[in-house]
């Protein structure tokens, strides 16, 4: 499989070969290597990596946490810091994150903060983490009910994408990854018609879609590493999507990140039509597509105020004003679009009557 010729990102056989070489270097230098997994990725994904540790006879320090977004938490971060400290991890230690976006975000932040930063490597194991979460160096935890409230920009040394991991990915998580692929489709100027194949992709098409998204994201984050400008377009669907996700977490709904983003895109397309002249047809077609693929996220009218509060805390806002990514009349993504509270409320009222 191809090497993306992007610094530090490797696919499949290239990834395993490079990882093996790195492990040998760590072993020769007596560096401690820690692996962070959740209970599911320990069961389904660790068996693919374990033989590499065994053949090099490097000590295995496996840190396992329970799966789920509620564990992208201060509590689990504390547990990881404790494990590293107890094992005497030094500044030359390495943390390998084996999992979905929860593990790469949490492990990335643990690595960023432990002894002011130790090396970290991501092995994303969900579609969503392969095309998005493991790339670009955003790390962090949820806090006090707000998504990604505490965190840091911290680049992994390498990202190794093994598409074989996707074989055990549950259907719901697969759809969650589609949420981010749909986002890329929109912000790269694609139309709804180009979305259809996502639902019935073969292995080769999956790899092509992943590589395309990786290339696009890396191009954008290389140009704007700390989100001063263009990188913001990657947040399309996320201002309202994150608020839906936080509400879902508080209400213990069964809502994944990508499902929340796919729903957020519905709402943000509505705002794009109202404020930026996007064609109504794009909204109507996406809505049909969304309903055919996802169990629609239902918003109760009584939760609108709650969602408005959550949106106000979004990191993309400026001076208390809600700033959003929209699509303009030509379908181009534009960032820093000011959305007034009454416009937001109109959008959420419209959304709450949809399903
Ligand atoms: N840092 C970023 O730029 C960025 C971007 C997008 C999303 N995110 C974050 O990513 C998180 C969501 O990530 P996610 O959707 O990967 O969720 P996740 O990490 O919770 O993984 C989803 C579920 O799938 C299981 N799983 C993972 N890989 C598996 C495999 N190969 N086989 C079987 N089961 C497997 C996990 O154990 C978990 O139960 C959110 O917290 C979101 O905020 C971060």
Image: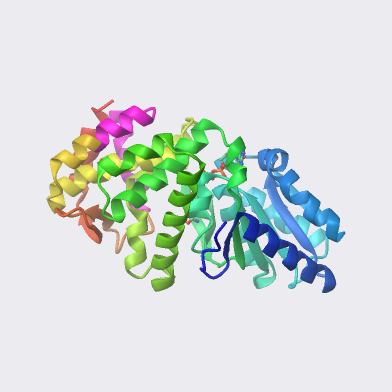
Query: Seen in the image, is 67 located left or right of residue 153?
Result: right
Whether residue 111 is visible here, answered yes or no, is yes
Q: In front here: 307 or 91?
A: 91
330 over 297 or under it: above or below: below
**Where's residue 292, x and y in %?**
33, 28
- Quarter of the image for the N terminus: give it: bottom right
Of 214 and 349, nearer the camera is 214
Foreground residue among 75 and 244: 244
- Residue 349 in view here: no
- Towards the viewer: 75 or 58: 58
- Magenta: main secondary structure: helix
Question: Which quarter of the rendered picture does the C terminus lie within?
Answer: top left
State yes or no: residue 291 in magenta. Answer: yes
Name the residue located 57 percent from the left edge and 41 percent from the top edge.
166
Specify the color scheme.
rainbow
Q: Residue at x 40, y 61 (%)?
A: 216
Residue 75 falls within the magenta-colored stretch: no
Determine whether, in the image, residue 5 is placed left or right of residue 327. Answer: right
- Residue at 77 percent across and 62 percent down: it is 33
70 is higher (above) or lower (below) than 80:
above
Ligand 1 quarter of the rendering? top right
Percent coordinates x, y for residue 195 in the rendering? 32, 41
**Picture coordinates of residue 30, whole percent (x, y):** 84, 71
Q: Which residues are magenta?
A: 286-313
Q: Is residue 213 left or right of residue 96?
A: left
């Amino acid at each position: 499989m191809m090497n993306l010729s992007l610094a530090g990102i490797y696919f499949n056989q290239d990834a395993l070969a490079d990882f093996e070489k790195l492990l040998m270097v760590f072993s020769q230098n007596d560096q401690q290597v820690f692996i962070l997994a959740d209970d599911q990725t320990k069961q389904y994904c660790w068996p693919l990596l374990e033989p590499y540790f065994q053949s090099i006879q490097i000590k295995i320090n496996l840190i396992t946490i329970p799966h789920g977004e509620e564990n992208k938490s201060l509590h689990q971060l504390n547990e990881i810091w404790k494990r590293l400290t107890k094992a005497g991890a030094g500044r030359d230690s390495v943390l390998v994150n084996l999992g979905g976006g929860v593990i790469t975000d949490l492990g990335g932040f643990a690595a960023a903060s432990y002894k002011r930063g130790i090396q970290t490597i991501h092995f994303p194991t969900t579609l969503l983490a392969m095309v998005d979460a493991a790339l670009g160096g955003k790390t962090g935890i949820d806090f006090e009910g707000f998504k990604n409230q505490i965190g840091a920009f911290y680049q992994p040394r390498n990202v190794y994408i093994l598409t074989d991991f996707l074989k055990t990915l549950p259907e719901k998580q697969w759809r969650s990854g589609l949420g981010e692929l749909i986002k890329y489709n929109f912000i790269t100027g694609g139309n709804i018609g180009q979305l259809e194949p996502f639902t019935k992709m073969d292995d080769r098409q999956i790899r092509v879609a992943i590589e395309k998204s990786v290339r696009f994201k890396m191009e954008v984050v290389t140009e704007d590493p700390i989100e001063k400008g263009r990188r913001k377009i990657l947040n399309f669907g996320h201002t309202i999507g994150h608020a839906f996700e936080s509400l879902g977490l508080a209400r213990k709904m069964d809502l994944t990140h990508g499902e929340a983003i796919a729903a957020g895109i519905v709402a943000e397309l509505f705002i794009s039509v109202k404020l930026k002249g996007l064609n109504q047809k794009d909204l109507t077609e996406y809505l049909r597509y969304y309903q055919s693929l996802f169990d629609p996220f239902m918003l109760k009218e009584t939760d609108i105020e709650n969602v408005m509060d959550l949106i106000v805390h979004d990191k993309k806002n400026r001076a208390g004003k809600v700033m959003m990514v929209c699509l303009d009349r030509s379908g181009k993504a534009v960032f820093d679009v000011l959305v007034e509270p009454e416009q937001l409320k109109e959008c959420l009222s419209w959304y709450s009557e949809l399903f």
